[in-house]
Every structure is written in structure tokens, then in C-alpha cells.
Amino acid sequence: MSRRNRKIQSVLLYAIFSFYVILLLAILLFKYVSPLELFSAGRPVYRSINIVPFHQIRSYLSGASNVSRSVVFNNVFWNIGLFIPLGIYLQLFKKGKRIVAGILFIFLTSLSVEIIQYIFGIGAADIDDILLNCAGGTIGILCYKLLAAFIKDENKIRTAITILGAIVGIPLLCLTVILLISN
């Protein structure tokens, strides 16, 4: 690959990653309140906490939680799906690619989000979200490891992730922006 193409690929890779991070923050921190309203005195405050592992998931499965299946599906699969790219990018950008260190980073990132949601009253702090986020991040790490097992060249892995990120990420970004604007 020529130097120019490698530079274009790097710019595209980091642009997609940047959009992912912005999207992740928008979904996790600003789904109920805009950043401009965060410190407004008149905004609604939504604050709850669950520190019992699998409590919310169990209530979803048993039907004790009076919510629709689409809410259950969205909660469980969005919490997993949103963190799969983080696991992939984490492995791509790290020098030492130890799985345990990656999972610990994802855990701390998810824990930080839940703490921020609670402190600012912008969501429910829930241990189940942390567990689901860690599951998603672990899936991402394992996807990277699987890709690395088939493609030994790190540059080819970067190319594959850049292409996949563009093919999957850009349409998802557009869809999410449309959904956020329509709400």
C-alpha cells in the first residue's frame, strides 16, 4: 500500500472511530437531556440505581417488568451492541493486546458512564448495563482476535476494520442521527 493510501486509510479509520465515540457518548449520556440542558435548573432529573446483578434482566425475562418486548430487546442488545466496536478498536489501537486488560478497560469505561448518569441525573445507573456492556466489549475483543488469527498482517487488519467500519458504521451513524433528531 502506498504511503498516500495508508495516510487516507488512517484518516478514515480515526474519523470513523471519532464518530463512534461521539455517537456512543450521545446515546449513553445525552439520550434524555441535551448537553446544553445538562446544567439547566428546570430540566427533568432521572436518577435511579440498581446494584443487584441481573435484577433488571431477570425482571425482563420473568415478565415482572411491565415493558414491551421491544424495550427489552433494545435495552439488552443496544447495551451489548454499542460496546462491540469499542472492543475491536481497543485491540486495534493497543500495543499489548491482552484480553483481560481490554475487558478491564471496558468495565471501567462502562462503570464511569453509569456513575456519570447517576451523578447528573441523566439515566439509570444499573449493574446490568455494565455487565451487558462488558459482554459487548468482550465480543468485540474476541472478534478482533478471530480476525487476527486469519489475517496475520496488522496493516491488513487495519484495512479490514476500516472498510467494515465504513460499510457498517456510516449507515448506522446516519440512522442514529435521524432517530435522535426525530425524537
Image (cartoon, grey):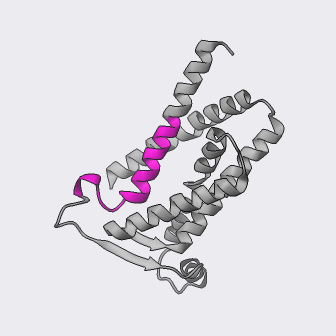
Q: In the rendered image, is residue 149 in sight?
A: yes
Q: In the rendered image, is residue 69 in sight?
A: no
Q: Is residue 67 left or right of residue 131?
A: left
The location of residue 19, given as percent across then percent down, is 46, 40
In the figure, residue 115 lies in which quadrant?
A: bottom left
Nearer to the camera, 179 or 81: 81
The location of residue 52, given as percent across then percent down, is 55, 82
Q: Is residue 114 left or right of residue 163?
A: left
Above or below, 7 against 59 in this view is: above
In the figure, residue 76 lies in which quadrant?
A: bottom right
In the figure, residue 61 lies in which quadrant?
A: bottom right
Q: Is residue 4 left or right of residue 100?
A: left
Quadrant housing the C terminus: bottom left
Quadrant housing the N terminus: top right
Q: At x 52% / y 61%, what residue is drawn?
A: 110
What's drawn in magenta, residue-wise?
16-37
Instruction: Give the main secondary structure of the magenta stretch.
Output: helix
Is residue 93 on the magenta stretch? no
Q: At x 81% / y 33%, what residue is drawn?
A: 152
